[in-house]
Image: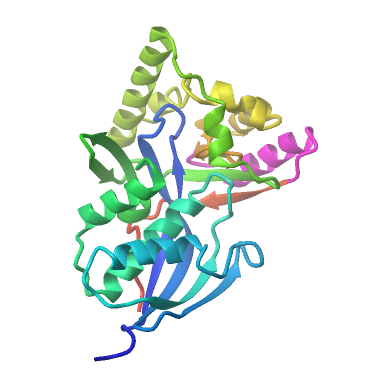
């Protein structure tokens, strides 16, 4: 019996969730990637190397999220692996609303699944990732790529992945401060009004229809939200001013990326101008930031060796 598994290397994209009105349901895979190299070991030994984002911050011991995920996948099989060699290189900013925790979860599950000979299909990977993350809006696009619409019913997750019929660019203003998802969720009310719920149903329906048909005019009116963004505005200094600056520079629409604090603009042109305008608006509130211009990743998590 071999003392270790085949070494597996996987790549997982960043994601932006919600897209404004699609709270906990919509997500888009973005072309920034984390890479994970995994070798499972028979012996109870753990070696972790981290480079890129999170170096010196993420734990390199048994408290590491990826190791916890890998271990949980192995325990679902009868494989006799007790340790691992893990090398990760992270390009996705941490705790900025670009799906860093979802990417870690999906990377761990995907790599472990490959190392074990792929006993789990993609639907099983989705359900495991959703159970660990708590909701599918980030893990679904990380797994499938493209834009995803997800629902959970009786503990079963259903996801549709598609590519918009619009050459969409995503301009993300990334501020230099962390915002935990837990804190962002604490800001949300327990109940919302019927009128606000109806507003979001109309806007998210229009957003998906516009993406699927390529209707830019409808899309430009579809990103507004009343379920979560108004309650999170106080956590992100200058949020509405950054939104206004992006739209004035040519954006079709704007949103908080995931739970924030990154803010995202959707556009088909003037990407550099929009990015500069967003950074300048943040600076008026003494918030340092930089911008990224992203495309939609159409493949999702995949093995690359």
Report the front residue among 231 and 39. 39
Quadrant location, the N terminus: bottom left
Is residue 17 part of the magenta span, yes or no?
no
Which colour assignment does the render follow?
rainbow
- The x and y percentages for residue 35 are 46, 69
- The x and y percentages for residue 226 are 48, 19
Q: Residue furthest bottom?
A: 1
Position above or below: 87 against 233: below
- The x and y percentages for residue 10 are 38, 70
Q: With 91 as the anchor, is 209 left or right in this view?
A: left
Looking at the rendering, which quadrant does residue 279 occupy?
Answer: top right
Q: With 214 as the anchor, is 55 left or right in this view?
A: right
Region in magenta: 267-288
Quadrant location, the C terminus: bottom left
Q: With 70 as the anchor, is 247 left or right in this view?
A: right
What residue is at 50 percent from the left and 19 percent from the top?
189
Is residue 282 part of the magenta span, yes or no?
yes
Report the front residue among 15 and 108. 108
Looking at the rendering, which quadrant does residue 116 occupy?
Answer: bottom left
Is residue 50 visible in the rendered structure shown here?
yes
């Amino acid at each position: 019996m071999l003392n270790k598994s085949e070494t597996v290397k996987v790549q997982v994209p960043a994601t932006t969730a919600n897209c404004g009105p699609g709270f906990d349901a919509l997500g888009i895979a973005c072309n920034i990637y984390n890479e994970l190299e995994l070798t499972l070991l028979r012996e109870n030994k753990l070696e972790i190397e981290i480079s890129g984002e999170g170096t010196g911050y993420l734990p390199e011991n048994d408290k590491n999220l990826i190791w916890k995920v890998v271990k949980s996948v192995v325990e679902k099989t009868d494989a006799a692996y007790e340790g691992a060699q893990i090398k990760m290189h992270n390009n996705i900013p941490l705790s900025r609303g670009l799906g860093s925790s979802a990417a870690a979860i999906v990377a761990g599950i995907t790599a472990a699944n490959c190392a074990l000979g792929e006993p789990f299909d993609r639907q099983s990977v989705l359900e495991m990732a959703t159970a660990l993350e708590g909701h599918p809006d980030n893990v679904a696009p990380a797994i499938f790529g493209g834009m995803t619409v997800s629902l959970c019913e009786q503990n079963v997750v259903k996801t549709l992945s598609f590519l918009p019929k619009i050459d969409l660019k995503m301009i993300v203003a990334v501020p230099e401060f962390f915002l935990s998802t837990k804190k962002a969720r604490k800001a949300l009310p327990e109940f919302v009004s019927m009128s606000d719920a109806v507003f979001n149903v109309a806007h998210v329906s229009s957003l998906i229809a516009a993406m699927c048909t390529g209707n830019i005019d409808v899309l430009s009116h579809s990103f507004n939200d009343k379920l979560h963004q108004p309650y999170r505005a106080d956590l992100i200094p200058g949020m509405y001013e950054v939104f206004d600056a992006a739209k004035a520079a040519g954006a079709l629409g704007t949103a908080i990326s995931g739970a924030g604090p990154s803010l995202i603009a959707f556009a088909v042109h003037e990407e550099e101008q929009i990015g500069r305008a967003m950074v300048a608006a943040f600076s008026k509130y003494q918030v340092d930031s930089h911008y990224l211009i992203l495309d939609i990743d159409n493949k999702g998590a995949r093995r690359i060796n």
